[in-house]
Amino acid sequence: MRRLKEFVAPLVYLSSNITSLIGVVLVTTATVLWLFLLPSFIKGEPGNAYTGILEFMLLPGVFFAGLVLIPLGIHFYRVGHRNELPPVFPDIDLQNERFRRLLMFVGVTTILNLIIGAQFSYRAVSYMESATFCGQTCHTVMKPEYTAYQNSPHARVACVSCHIGPGANWFVKSKLSGTWQVISVTFNLYQRPIPTPVKALRPARETCEVCHWPQKFAGNRVHIIDKFTDDEQTRHLKTVLMLKIGGGGGYEGIHGAHMGPGVEVTYGHSDEKRQTIPWVQYSRNGDKTIFKAEGFKDADMGKLEMRTMDCIDCHTRPAHSYKLPERAVDEALARGLMDASLPFVRKTALSIIKVDYATTADSEREIPKRFMAYYQQAYPALWQSKRPAIESTAKAVMAAFAENVFPEMRVKWGVYPNNLGHTDYPGCFRCHDERAGDKGNKTIPMDCDTCHKKLAEDEESPKILSELGLTPATGGTK
Ligand code: HEC
Ligand code: HEC
Ligand code: HEC
Ligand code: HEC
Ligand code: HEC
């Protein structure tokens, strides 16, 4: 105790200079604010890049800057007051004026920080974790994802639920990578469009299964797909599929086949976007079958990147579902946002939204103008009688574009593949192409009844819907 005092007494005496005291204030501030953020850190609450910057860069930076200032101040004080130093340093007790001053500095700073911390950090942290913040703060960068997210079934699910998920480990990982993302946004180093797939995304089963546990989705699901024709008077066609959702902890259907107990599907892809899959291994409780695409040579194995299949290999776009132009227009027509009675409405809308506009401002100026101009010129009488319908349809045409195309981020029609299906993108057919396995006569089946039963295709009034009591059928389930 005595020796400790002998060591600390000169420090207390010498650090009573302005430089060291600033150091003390910085160290105290960083420590107190860091402690404020600690609970969310320990609980492993998801956070994002900005709290990451605060916790892992800014506060430690301040802390160490303070730590450097204290001895620096002591050093200069010593040099400056070489001849005035007392032979014996005063004891550390409340009689010691310099000690009192130091205590006061630490005390006042701490109290101020407690007040500031209580006021700001908690609110700042919870704000920073909200979807609004994630989506809007780097507005041009995240605008495509945020817009698509707001139109998705997950519009009320926080970004961090999928991008970070529970647990301290991923929290730290995502903070570090998030910190890098913020730096790259600040210095304009990011790619446009933001490349997909997200390499550092957490294995989806750990995030998605927090809400969708595999026992929950099972059985079949009827899916009605609306389409419209390009005729002068567009016709509403419906395709009715019964999808074999499956799962439920067994090997049934789509989910059971790939995600059932003890099942692991591993694949090798030759392109960045995982769209070309020449090699697949199916393993159920250790029983393995390898399927190779026609013409694939084992010598090319080294060129493939391997991956274990999880939810996002099919559900690539659960929250950021960009549509192709035809789907966007069909959906707006089905929902009544576009007036289906206007002549050539689908064809006109498509020809206008498929144009490559250089900026969002250009598109906002041109799209409604061109759409209305078409009716003004080709159907002047109709323009007179149905002007409000044409104007509101023009707005919906604009929305169909604005929800899916973001010129500034070079997000054009179809840059982000949706793997759920096989008509818009290769999707299921990346593997399901009847390729043979190395055992027995197994293939990855392409038979049309494997995944769905087609109850109707492109019919105006499918019998199945009237049987189900769904006439006149409107709208899809998508
Ligand atoms: C339901 C889960 C989920 C939610 C909620 C979610 N995302 Fe995503 N996000 C994904 C998946 C899955 C991908 C695609 C991963 C892939 O293809 O590798 C992705 C991709 C991205 C990408 C990369 C570009 C792209 O489109 O592939 C960005 C940026 C992104 N999300 C930002 C956000 C933001 C911002 C929010 C909140 C406004 C958010 N995400 C909410 C699941 C989600
Ligand atoms: C925080 C909870 C939560 C997480 C995490 C989550 N979801 Fe969901 N998801 C929901 C809710 C709630 C709905 C239902 C929305 C509705 O019925 O409109 C939903 C709906 C869905 C649907 C059905 C959409 C449709 O068209 O009806 C799919 C598919 C889906 N989620 C996949 C995923 C995938 C894949 C992930 C992981 C990348 C994921 N979800 C992560 C809450 C979540
Ligand atoms: C082999 C591809 C594939 C994989 C892997 C996959 N799904 Fe699906 N999932 C589908 C298809 C196809 C549908 C039906 C889509 C539709 O109705 O449009 C579907 C539907 C769903 C639905 C809606 C079910 C309903 O009854 O409405 C949920 C929720 C879902 N999947 C979650 C998940 C989760 C979570 C995972 C990962 C554990 C996962 N899926 C893995 C292909 C897949
Ligand atoms: C990475 C490759 C891959 C992709 C992508 C893929 N599958 Fe599969 N799928 C397989 C393999 C491998 C099997 C097992 C084949 C076997 O051994 O019978 C399988 C089996 C199935 C089965 C069970 C078949 C049966 O005979 O019982 C269904 C249903 C299925 N897949 C649906 C889908 C759907 C729907 C999609 C797209 C959303 C999809 N799969 C995408 C690899 C894939
Ligand atoms: C490996 C599984 C699988 C196989 C095999 C398969 N399909 Fe599909 N099919 C799907 C999925 C998944 C969807 C998307 C359903 C959705 O959008 O909800 C789909 C969608 C469709 C659609 C609706 C397209 C649209 O416009 O949205 C049609 C039509 C269709 N399939 C026909 C076929 C035919 C014909 C075959 C046989 C050559 C076939 N399918 C084989 C999984 C499969």
Image (cartoon, rainbow, N blue to C red):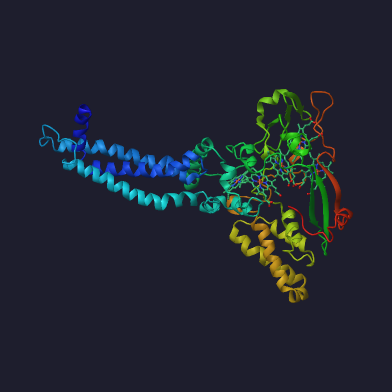
**Relative depth, front residue between 375 and 169:** 169
Residue 17 visible in image: no
**Quarter the N terminus occupies:** top left
Which quadrant holds residue 274? top right
- Residue at the image position 56 percent from the left and 50 percent from the top: 142
Judge whether 9 appears above or below 347 on screen. above
Of residues 431 and 168, the one drawn nearer to the viewer in this rendering: 168
Judge left or right: residue 161 versus residue 475: left
Residue drawn 74% across the image and 38% down it: 248
- Residue 65 at x, y = what percent? 32, 40
Q: In the displayed structure, does residue 282 sit left or right of residue 184?
A: right
Nearer the observer, 263 or 219: 219
Number of numbered discs on residues: 0
Q: Residue 345: x and y, percent?
A: 77, 64
Q: Position of residue 113 (x, y in %)?
A: 34, 48
Report which quarter residue 82 is drawn in: top left
Query: Quadrant location of ligand 5?
Result: top right
Residue 76 lies, with reference to residue 284, above or below; the image says: below
Q: Residue 301: percent from the left, percent from the top?
A: 69, 25
Please indicate whether residue 399 sits to the left or right of residue 239 in the image: left
- Residue drawn where x is 49% and y is 44% of the image: 49
Is residue 45 visible in this depiction of the protein? yes
